Amino acid sequence: MAFGRRCPYGARVIDVALRPADLRPAEVAVVIDVLRATSTATQALSAGYGRVMCAETLALALELRAPGRVVAGERNGTKPPGFDQGNSPAEAAERRGDEFVLATTNGAPTIVAAAGLAPRVVLACLLNLDAVIRAVSSHSQADVQIVCSGTDGAAALEDVYVAGRLSAALAGERTDAALVAEAVVRGFPTAFDALAASRDAARLRAVDLGADIAACAVESVLDIVPTVIAAGGGVATVTAGGSSDADSGAQLGDTVRV
Amino acid sequence: MAFGRRCPYGARVIDVALRPADLRPAEVAVVIDVLRATSTATQALSAGYGRVMCAETLALALELRAPGRVVAGERNGTKPPGFDQGNSPAEAAERRGDEFVLATTNGAPTIVAAAGLAPRVVLACLLNLDAVIRAVSSHSQADVQIVCSGTDGAAALEDVYVAGRLSAALAGERTDAALVAEAVVRGFPTAFDALAASRDAARLRAVDLGADIAACAVESVLDIVPTVIAAGGGVATVTAGGSSDADSGAQLGDTVRV
């Protein structure tokens, strides 16, 4: 494992990509799409799905259809034609198959993109906040980029908020983008307030999915660190790494390119 | 004047470019490089220089040398070879000629880039915060993008802070990037705290220019709204618009392309 190698800056760097275009090579990428892709993926793995296959496009997700696979995702917040279910963590919490295919507008493509730039990619949200902090902290020398999936390429307030929560809990030298995210955290009394103030929350309320906002604002109830184990062809395969497993390094191994 | 025309979103939008790569067409661009280019340009116009010519490169600035022109700027924070002075607002406050040429790493190129995308470009910092708010508010229908010059393409904490101060004072529908900037403001007790926490502040202290941080953190002492009046060939020419002049629309007229 080269996980412990020091970053080129001479000290461990904690950086935040405020939007996917800021993605850069890093030893560890922590991808956030708290409303809702990474919340849903975390919930699916917690429900017992063996893997979550994040697909860059709706078409790719439909191509992955197979017995035992549940095809989930959204366009404009709602379930696309031909899909089994939407992108709600509440739906993902009910296991209906062995594997979970997920195609979303922002989170899924960002996870795939991050897997192309970082050897280790984990998925974070509020549901698994403490588990991700423990897993990343256990590798205290690794250069980390926390990646906000954003919305249609632009910064999404709720992802920057969660990035700030993670950044503030990790030791290392912060970039200004990380300091921006940490200041955003101090600017809201609660996680729910930050999530609810976002445009994505407004969009969810507009399609009667407002209940998902509160569901995604619950903190550190799942001991799951979704970890990309293989990526290629527009699909990133994610399995559950508990934070205690991650301490052994087993769950934060290098991604296999396929 | 088409200044009052409504933006394509149907309501006035207040957006923030957290870094120059987020620049997009807008009716009004408000460019910030509080440490230090826009502070220095504002101070120069306040000192009585008739115009500030922002140059994209050091070479362009040197080509603009002429009798009565003071050539100022920085690379890595300090005065480049052949320049008359650095990028300190304190130096700019002493008038030594009729026109001020300014070439800096982040602010000057961002001002030139903004002038290529927005018909009206003004320069903001803390020194002229209230004057800029009054000038932009007087055109209450215009779509506004507040542009953070950042550092080497990445977000700079101090610029995002000032963007948040402006955004919070303007009426309109906010993008999530604007909400991020406003939350950053709530995350710091004072402007000085935000500026001093940035990497750019650390760089200034490292080259013994730490006094500039406090000088740039002084709020609303100059009634100057630096406004781009012409741009082309890598140079943007800026003159002083007082906020009362701006109310007449005279100082926020369309930029002339040259």
Image (cartoon, coloured by chain):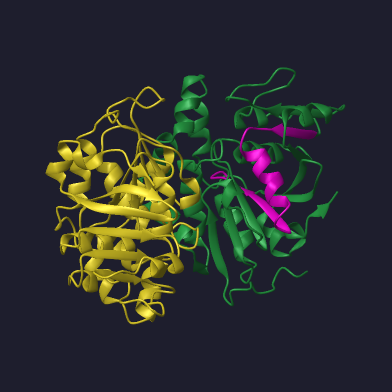
Chain colours: A green, B yellow
Question: Is residue B228 shown left or right of residue B18?
Answer: left
B120 shown above or below B76: above
Q: Which residues are magenta?
A: A99-127
Of residue A240 and residue B158, the one placed in the foreground of this image is: B158
Q: How far across and down, in percent of the image, does residue A162 sit?
A: 50, 48
The image shows residue A36, relative to residue A189, as above or below, that is above
Q: Residue furthest top?
A: A81
Residue depicted at x 39% and y 79%: B82
Instruction: Locate residue A152, reporting x and y percent.
Output: 56, 35
| Nearer to me, B4 or B69 | B69
User: From the image, which quarter does the N terminus of chain A lie in?
Assistant: bottom right
Residue A158 left/right relative to A47? left
Q: Position of residue A27 (x, y in %)?
A: 67, 63
Q: Where is residue B5? Give x, y as percent.
A: 31, 25
Question: Is A158 part of what is drawn in magenta?
Answer: no
Residue A106, magenta (yes or no): yes
In this view of the protein, can residue A241 be seen by the observer? no
* Residue B125 shown left or right of residue B116 in the figure: left
Residue B254, quarter of picture: top left
Place residue B204 in its image quadrant. bottom left
Numbered marks: total = 0
Q: Residue at x 60, y 62 (%)?
A: A144
Q: Residue furthest front?
A: B67
Residue occupying the point 22% across, 47% down: B132
Foreground of the two, B24 or A240: B24
Answer yes or no: is residue B139 visible: yes
Frontmost residue, A142 versus A41: A142
